[in-house]
Amino acid sequence: MIQTVIFDMDGVLVDTEPLHRDAFFQHFAELGVTLTAEKYATFLGSSTRNMYQQFKEEFGLTEDVETLMSRKREFFGKAFDESTDLELLPGARELVLDLHKAGMPLQLASSASKETIHRVFKRFELYPYFDNLVSGEDFPQSKPNPALFLHAAKLAGKPPYECLVIEDSANGVSAAKAAGMYCIGFSSPHSGGQNLHHADQVVSDLRHLNAELILGLSTPVGSVVTK
């Protein structure tokens, strides 16, 4: 039986990915780095720190990772604060409220920085509904490494097999399954055609999910049901 739900943030609760993408590519242009959209898509679900660690090695960047991250976050923060049309994804708030009302403990496990998580949770007033917020910046490796989700489960006081993860990226789904958790893949139009075939279930709209459905899940972990 599912005892806690762990949400990813970018691409699941809110679509900040275009803002992140623009911030990265503005920074790449400033650094003189050429990165294809296809190569960038392979990093979805990874933390900013891990991305810059790889970029620094691959492109021979001379600045340290902290400086690189700080500059990218300047671009992102400006775009986030100036955005007037950024909203939670359709069905996201309703699902959070429905699960909260049903007494289901909620956790966030996002590769985003603490600063970005705070911006989103403050803007959309999500703090009251989540027990724990876990940021990928605190871990040496990003998704698909399962550490982020395992830590969220530990904070929730639940074994992995009682946790359900909602993810929109291939790296995130792989991390959830590596952690031994049930995973619902959200095939979001904002997530760059991610391959979610490892998920136990795939939905194309968060409005297809509700507390009753999640509380009633009895499908063994590892089986695949596609919707």
Image (spheres, rainbow, N blue to C red):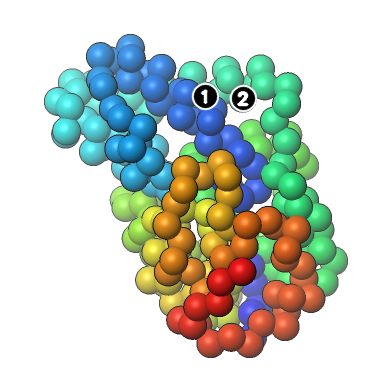
Say which mark, if any, is on residue 76: 1
Q: Position of residue 143 (x, y in %)?
A: 38, 55
Q: Secondary structure at mark 1?
A: helix
What's the residue at 53%, 36% (across, down)?
17
Q: Is residue 221 left or right of residue 204?
A: left
Q: Residues within 10 Å of mark 2 (few under 14, many from 20)?
A: some
Q: Position of residue 225 (x, y in %)?
A: 55, 77
| Residue highlighted by disc 2 | 80
* Residue situated in front as seen by the camera: 190 or 75: 190
Q: Is residue 181 left or right of residue 50?
A: right
Label 1 to label 2, Cα distance in Å? 6 Å
Q: Is residue 80 left or right of residue 174?
A: right
How many numbered marks, from 0 up? Answer: 2
Q: Secondary structure at mark 2?
A: helix
**The quarter of the displayed image where residue 71 is located:** top left
Asked if 103 appears above or below 50 in the picture, the reply is below
What's the residue at 53%, 31% (across, down)?
18
Mark 1 is on which residue type? Answer: Phe
Asked if 65 appears above or below 154 in the picture, the reply is above
Q: Is residue 183 left or right of residue 137?
A: right
Mark 2 is on which residue type? Answer: Phe
Q: Do residues under tags 1 and 2 come within 8 Å of each other at their CB atoms?
A: yes
Asked if 29 appears above or below 214 in the picture, the reply is above
Q: Position of residue 68 (x, y in %)?
A: 33, 24
Q: Position of residue 126 (x, y in %)?
A: 74, 47
**The quarter of the displayed image where residue 195 is located:** bottom left
What's the residue at 76%, 67% (across, down)?
210
Q: Residues within 10 Å of mark 1 (few under 14, many from 20)?
A: many
